[in-house]
Amino acid sequence: MVPPLARTPEEWTEVVSGLGGRAFHGKQVFRWIQARSVLEAEKMSDLPAPLRASLADLGPGARANVTHERVAADGTRKLLLTLHDGATIETVLIPGVSGRKGDLPNPVNGSFDDADASVADDDEEEDETPGEARSAEEGARGANALRTGTTAEDTDYVRVTQCISTQVGCAMGCVFCASGVAGLKRHLGPDEIVAQVLVGRARLPEGQRLRNVVYMGMGEPLANYDATARSLRLLTHPDGIGLSARRVTVSTSGLVPQIAQLGKDFGGNIGLAISLHAADDEARTRLMPINKKYPLDALMRALRAYPLPRRRRITIEYTLVAGKNDSLQDARKLTRLLRGLPVKVNLIPMNPISDAALSAPDMGSVLAFQRVLCDAGYSCFIRRRRGDDVSAACGQLALLGAKAKVRVNRA
Ligand code: SAH
Ligand code: SF4
């Protein structure tokens, strides 16, 4: 059975019909949960009392308790969530710039930007959404804004990007990644993926608004395709959280068949980020074992076939690891590999993990690498990881949590 947090309005209609409710009550339940983060049936005030009682008897939705919350100096909020079976995952809320036009960063010199916040928030691309809805009422206002262009609301809040997880750990084994080193514990259900957004959104301080969601936390989203796809449908449902599909980005290490599936299932509307990290098979396989199964040739073909809407681009993530993929020759290879593809490139100096043999290049090498890409005509940004003082690099807080537990057990 589909868990409550992962049900579509149609599935809720079926459930409430079975409980003696009317068809439209299904949509109401969906709205309470997804648009207003109200999970307790007794609080769903526009439902008839007997239906509320029957729904309450069905039991709670996915349990995702915040067991750690850290706010970095730059406002990045990192939540550690403990799931029903004790597994821990993380989600990060990254405040970006205020919606006021004058406050936007200048990407020309300011080629340093938020690694996660910026991936789905490309100001060079046409903005077709008026901001996301927190409630059904705001959803209606959002629809008005669509018609009228913009509202005061658009400009008076800080846009937040949330980074969410799709698995507990990851099986892909990328050598520079904390989640990869930890290995896969289990997939997340669609309800657990959506729960991160419901919990995260509920914690946003006044003046902040959820704007983008990036699937860049723990795990490989496309290795958990069905749950990821369902969560995408839920997050972008207009009666729910109502995110614009173009403001939701799935990041993948390059699972070729699932990239095609994602393109087919969502018509290319979901943002796509590819963790490339190397421009030749030998170097990439050393960093990312998945490259053996889906080498660059196959991956590039999948990217060319992705049904990208006009004016949209694929984000290429390139984590720079000293001595492994950061030479000028690597940069030149990258320019050749990407030729003709609508892409923007994010260079991310590697965040330290416990493997001391791997480290970020010095800033001079990073800038020189960027220069090669810029000179070849690519949009290329150096992204800093936000919230360094709270271990905001993906996988790190959950790993800290795991270590803390080990220590407690030993004490
Ligand atoms: N599994 C997916 C999404 C999660 S990882 C993927 O690999 O795309 C999100 C991004 O963080 C990926 O681009 C990944 O390569 C990058 N990343 C992982 N560990 C990192 C580290 N230590 N330093 C910098 N980037 C890292
Ligand atoms: Fe998994 Fe992505 Fe980390 Fe690779 S980079 S191990 S695919 S989470």
Image (tube, helix red, strand yellow):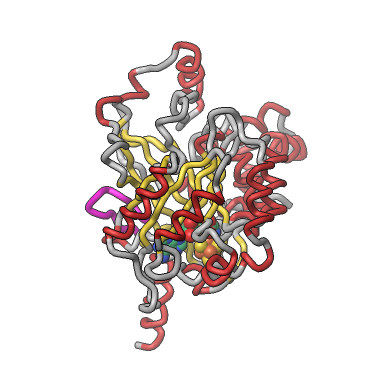
Which residue is found at the position 52% from the left and 41% from the top? 343
Residue 76 falls inside the magenta stretch: yes
The image shows residue 214 at horizontal and vertical percentages of: 49, 47
Q: For the view shown, which residue lies furthest in the bottom direction?
A: 410
Q: Is residue 63 visible?
A: no
Which residue is found at the position 40% from the left and 62% from the top? 326
The image shows residue 48 at horizontal and vertical percentages of: 62, 30
- Which one is nearer the viewer's eye here, 177 or 54? 177
- Which one is nearer the viewer's eye here, 147 or 319? 319
Which of the 4 image quarters holds residue 311? top right
- Which one is nearer the viewer's eye here, 192 or 115? 115
The image shows residue 55 at horizontal and vertical percentages of: 64, 43
Which of the 4 image quarters holds residue 237? top right
366 relative to 292 in the view: left or right? left
**Residue 406 vertical placement versus 15 (above, below):** below
Residue 379 falls inside the magenta stretch: no
Give the magenta part as a residue range: 69-78
**Residue 403 vertical placement versus 334 (above, below):** below
